Image (spheres, rainbow, N blue to C red):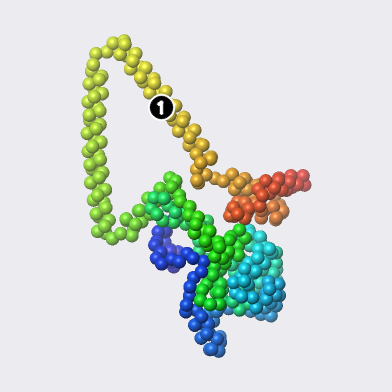
Amino acid sequence: LVALRTEQMTMTAFQLEGVELAARLTDARFPAQLRVAAAVPAEPNNVDPRTSLRGPQGAENEAVLRRVIAEIGGAELPPLEFARRATAWLRARHAYALSVRLPPGAGRDDIVRWLDSNEPGFCEYFAGALTVLCRAAGHPARVVAGFHGGVLNGFENYYMVRNSDAHAWVEVHDGKAAWVRHDPTPGAVAGEAGAGAAAVRQEQDSSWSARVDSLRILWYRRIVNFDSRAQLQMFDQVKTLTTESGQALRQRFDAWSKDVKAWLQQPWDWARAGRSAGYAAAALVAAVAGLRLLRWGWSRWRGWGGRDAPDPVRQAAGRWLRRLRRSDRADATVVADLQRLRFGRRETWPEPRAVFRRARRERNRKAGKA
């Protein structure tokens, strides 16, 4: 993973083994680590396995966390119930947005300042805030960064995961022998119920883009990740196939040339010339009609049926963002809603038509001032 930073590639293919996709991850050793940590006095250089990293320090940060924990229901709640209520508390106070503005507050931690405000945030803010709250209440928790989503390639039976699927969530220890997934980001389904629903839903992509992607994977499997012997064997197979295909094509072309030559050497009269001209005109009309039909079908597919066709809502939001960017001091709420429509997940969208009406009023207001 460290070497990937210097790798000049637009795609990386790798294989994972022993992946556990359930929302509950069994960890039998962690309770023993907790008991050992409780028996050994804490030292400055020791890492407490209950937290892995130290939380926000200082009187101001601790006062905010104590107040928020009391609003949630208190540290006496069971770990999973506390995580559920903390998730509801965060979603009630904060909306989802890709652009985040931290409120001022010298001396306080960034995450503490954000969770104590009403500012929107993206998945890393929600995951970090939930982890800090759980740890401050005495419940072990950790942030998990990875990918949420992807589709199954219908040709090579693997998951295609893109940068737009990047996500962050939280795992909270249940106090017994397992870590349980919680996703506090608005629009996500937290806990084991969401994992069950995701396991049932398995999207499969069999489009042409998936076919091209499968060919790229084959290139990495057969060439990049193979040794020199396997590569030579594959090159020999490709060379043999190409040679045989070329020979068959030349034989077919020679036979077709002889047939055309024999046809041209036959006696010509006005009736034969008329029939030939009619056949040529019909072939030309059929070719033109076929090309027009292909262009019409291509435009319809790109506009309606293509899986990778541009989303009209996202396109419209991008146009409004460019228009408002040329205005000075555009309304931040309108800009945030437009950014959510342009870049955010569909389940976090506000009502698009209402946002576009507000953007139009904002543009007209700026034009009137000018």
Q: In which quarter of the image is residue 53?
A: bottom right
Q: Residue at x 61, y 46 (%)?
A: 313
What amino acid is found at the position of numbered circle 1 in the picture? Ala
Q: Quadrant of residue 39?
A: bottom right
Pick whichever, 183 or 124, lies toward us.
Answer: 183
Q: In this view, does 361 lie above or below 48?
A: above
Pick whichever, 46 or 182, lies toward us.
Answer: 182
Answer yes or no: is residue 107 visible.
no
Residue 206: x percent and y percent?
43, 47
Residue 248: x percent and y percent?
23, 37
* Residue 60 in the figure: left or right of residue 242: right
* Residue 37 in the figure: left or right of residue 259: right
Residue 104: x percent and y percent?
70, 68
Q: Residue at x 39, y 62 (%)?
A: 15
Q: Which residue is drawn at 41% across and 59% down?
A: 12
Residue 221: x percent and y percent?
34, 57
- Figure quadrant of the N terminus: bottom left
Q: Name the residue under label 1.
A: 287
